């Protein structure tokens, strides 16, 4: 199965290891992974901030880059959801709406792809540690992927899971919200980190680098003894140490 | 602006909210409790999603045929012997009500809880005319003593604690009792009894009007709407022009969904349905009945992309799950309509000058949309506001517009992005310390107020991938 990896700009620039783990994991599951080089950003930061016209250029570019792919897989529920929304953004546009739909229809978030398309629930991973999991808003509520990450985590050997209080409450990232409404964002991410500390988990796992960068940054600032990892890093861990 | 709360700018209101630790404890505690109760209450109904769909259809149907149902409603109220007044503005509504009070030579008015009367700032205007106006909902009663305003659509005094109430009763009434809620309530009850008996007019809000019968339905837990409408000789009900249902069949569905969504109750203590003035042979009821139907900007929302907000049944479930509301409280919104519904509705009714920040005070997390019993796409409406503010109103700050145009260029040209992201790690080197950015300017500075920001990778993911394809990586 041929998979075009939509790595996301955050992973490309800040979290090489997440991209690496995603590639290795998909290959381990028998996929042929390609990385369309022209890819940049899905346009979400501008789109969500209300700059819809500006964001459309980014979207058209991504459509051109990805439209010929067989499957598009992204290690981010939020960015995958942006692809899913493209047809609505280009609604009524005779050229771009059908092209957007083509892209949207074959886009999957990583865990969703593994469980729903590859039909794999146990990726053969092992991880020695006590983890908790943050459910990202866009992935959970908008993309509607709720159970896939939990299904996959539940089959990781050695992994101990503690549920996060208010696990589906927003971490306060929200793209430009985090810098535009920084007073409110700080309170939200602080409560999130306090809840993580309460679980006593050594690792906070998530499936969206935007949220994770926010939570990690706060955890570091308050000196919380918790490591923030992307779910791909856990699922790609086979007996060897994480990272 | 009648619906406005306070005069401080948005950032200051938010700071004030965030620093109010008591309020935040009360709000987060209430949110957590209410959400558990709500989930239990909606689960009992069976397939909640089907109920939501039905709720949405009923509300949409009413909005699409609003002229028809409003005519039917007013005809039926008139047949029952009531008076109907369509107020296109807050001012018209206030003037009409003041006119009735004058005609009746009224001195005292009792009121049951009503958000639309808060919206039109009715109390202050009636008081300016020399009338005594007494709020009878316990929460509103508490707020009125200190000239405070509601911070929540359903639980107006959510930001107050029992000690504050005790103190307030003491300073206004010489109350010497304890801060036990039962005792406080007993005191308010005693005070209110006299007000009910001596009031000339009772004013109520309206949860739903039933077009087919000309009835108004009021939902309370305190029975205060019943006393406010059965003791005074004149009843005035004030309703937002969209708050109606075709028949009792739809009323049943929506009342069921309203109380479950609002406070996790199967049924409230009182579902009061009143039809016109006292008829021949009726045991009680007012001698005169007035229905004031308030537009105040609503008809301008009809037919626009924001129409779904008029589906709202004011349950405040969206506020009860909103992570922003949780930390800033209701008064930060600067409007009597707080929470996600307030962030959508306030700019529409009160204008962008006053409320342009509200649509941006959201992470678009979608919790509000998920919980709304009538399926209002709240986070999408917030996003639509942003688009209007940025693109139609041109109100985005220049710095942000500049950043976004750079974003537009950088994210649509592979060459530009490639160059920028490639040199980022080197260019930022002077300010990188322990693989983190050590100081930020602009948006980065705001980010770093609360958390660390990572340094860009030396090897971007795309470089790793390319090297690997060339056989340059081990794994």
Image: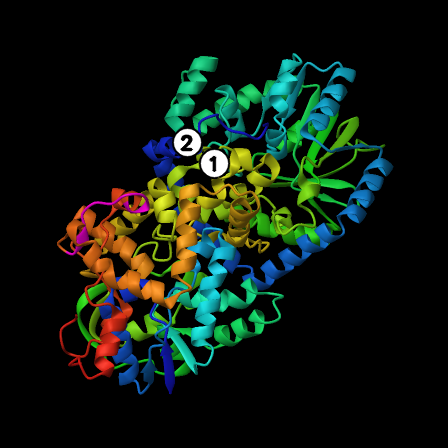
State the predominant SS element of the stretch in magenta: loop
- Is residue B475 a member of the stretch shown in magenta? no
Please provide percent x and percent y for residue B309: 60, 48
Q: Which residue is mark 1?
A: B333
In the picture, measured across the screen, residue A175 lies left or right of residue B356, that is left
Q: Quadrant of residue B270?
A: top right
Q: Quadrant of residue B269?
A: top right
Which chain does the residue under circle 1 lie in? B
Please give the label number shown on residue B13.
2
Which chain does the residue under circle 2 lie in? B
Report if residue B422 is visible in the image.
yes
Q: In the image shown, does A211 or A141 lie closer to the viewer?
A: A211
Q: In the image shown, does B98 or B341 lie closer to the viewer?
A: B341
Please provide percent x and percent y for residue B84: 80, 33
Residue under the image location 19 percent in, 46 percent down = A222
Is disc 2 surrounded by few (<14), some (14 to 19) or many (20+) residues within 10 Å?
many
Circle 1 sits in a helix, a strand or a loop, which is it?
A: helix
In the picture, measured across the screen, residue B24 lies left or right of residue B1, that is left
Residue B282, above or below A218 = above
Q: In the image shown, does A199 or A93 lie closer to the viewer?
A: A93
Please provide percent x and percent y for residue A216: 24, 55
Q: Which residues are magenta?
A: B435-444
- The mark nearer the N terminus, 1 or 2, is 2
């Amino acid at each position: 199965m041929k998979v075009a990896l939509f790595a996301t700009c955050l992973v490309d620039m800040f979290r090489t290891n997440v991209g690496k783990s995603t590639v290795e994991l998909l290959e381990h599951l028998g996929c042929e992974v390609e990385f369309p080089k022209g890819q940049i950003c899905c346009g979400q930061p501008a789109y969500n901030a209300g700059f819809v016209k500006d964001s459309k250029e980014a979207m058209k570019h991504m459509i051109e880059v990805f439209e010929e792919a067989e499957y598009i897989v992204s290690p981010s529920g939020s960015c995958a959801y942006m692809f899913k929304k493209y047809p609505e953004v280009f609604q009524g546009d005779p050229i771009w709406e059908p092209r957007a739909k083509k892209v949207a229809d074959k886009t999957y978030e990583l865990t969703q792809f593994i469980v729903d398309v590859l039909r794999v629930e146990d990726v053969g991973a092992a991880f020695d540690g006590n983890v908790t999991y943050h459910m990202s808003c866009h992935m959970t509520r908008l993309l509607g992927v709720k159970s896939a990450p939990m299904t996959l985590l539940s089959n990781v050997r050695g992994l101990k899971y503690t549920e996060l209080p208010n696990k589906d409450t927003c971490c306060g990232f929200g793209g430009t919200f985090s810098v535009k409404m920084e007073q409110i964002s700080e309170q939200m991410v602080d409560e999130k980190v306090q809840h993580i500390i309460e679980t006593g988990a050594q690792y906070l796992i998530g499936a969206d680098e935007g949220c994770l960068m926010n939570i990690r940054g706060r955890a570091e600032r308050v000196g919380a003894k918790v490591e923030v990892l992307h779910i791909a890093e856990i699922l790609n861990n086979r007996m060897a140490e994480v990272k | 602006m009648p619906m406005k709360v306070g005069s401080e700018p948005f950032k200051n209101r938010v700071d004030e909210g965030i620093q109010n630790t008591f309020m935040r404890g009360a709000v987060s505690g209430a949110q957590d409790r209410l959400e558990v109760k709500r989930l239990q209450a909606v689960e009992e109904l069976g397939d909640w999603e089907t109920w939501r769909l039905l709720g949405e259809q009923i509300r949409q149907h009413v909005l699409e045929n609003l002229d028809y149902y409003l005519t039917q409603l007013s005809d039926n109220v008139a047949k029952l012997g009531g008076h109907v007044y369509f107020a296109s503005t807050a001012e018209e509504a206030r003037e009409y009500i003041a006119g009735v009070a004058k005609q009746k030579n009224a001195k005292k008015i009792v009121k049951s809880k009503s958000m639309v009367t808060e919206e039109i700032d009715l109390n202050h205007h009636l008081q300016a005319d020399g009338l005594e106006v007494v709020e009878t909902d316990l929460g509103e009663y508490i707020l009125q003593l200190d000239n405070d305003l509601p911070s929540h659509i359903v639980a107006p005094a959510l930001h107050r604690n029992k000690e504050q109430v005790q103190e307030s009763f003491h300073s206004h009434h010489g109350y010497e009792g304890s801060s036990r809620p039962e005792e406080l309530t007993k005191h308010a009850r005693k005070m209110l009894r006299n007000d009910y008996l001596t009031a000339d007019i009772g004013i109520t809000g309206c949860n739903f009007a039933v077009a087919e019968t000309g009835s108004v339905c009021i939902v309370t837990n305190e029975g205060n709407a019943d006393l406010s409408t059965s003791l005074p000789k004149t009843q005035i009900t004030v309703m937002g022009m969209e708050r109606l249902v075709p028949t009792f069949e739809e009323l049943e569905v929506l009342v069921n969904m309203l109380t479950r969504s609002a406070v996790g109750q199967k049924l409230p203590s009182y579902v009061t349905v009143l039809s016109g003035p006292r008829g021949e042979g009726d045991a009680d009821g007012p001698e005169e009945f007035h229905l004031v139907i308030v537009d105040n900007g609503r008809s301008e929302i009809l037919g626009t992309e924001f129409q779904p907000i008029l589906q709202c049944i004011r349950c405040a479930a969206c506020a009860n799950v909103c992570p922003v509301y949780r930390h800033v409280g209701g008064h930060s919104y600067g409007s009597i309509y707080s929470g996600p519904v307030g962030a959508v509705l306030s700019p529409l009714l009160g204008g962008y000058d006053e409320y342009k920040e509200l649509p941006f005070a959201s992470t678009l997390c979608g919790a509000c949309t998920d919980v709304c019993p009538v399926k209002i796409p709240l986070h999408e409406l917030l996003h639509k506001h942003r688009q209007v503010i940025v693109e139609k109103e041109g109100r985005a700050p220049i710095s942000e517009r500049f950043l976004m145009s750079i974003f537009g260029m950088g994210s649509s040209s592979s060459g530009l992005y490639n160059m920028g992201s490639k040199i980022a790690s080197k260019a930022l080197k002077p300010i990188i310390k322990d693989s983190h950015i050590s100081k930020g300017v602009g948006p980065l500075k705001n980010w770093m107020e609360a958390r660390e920001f990572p340094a860009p990778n030396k090897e971007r993911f795309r470089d790793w991938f390319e090297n690997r394809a060339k056989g340059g990586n081990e794994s």
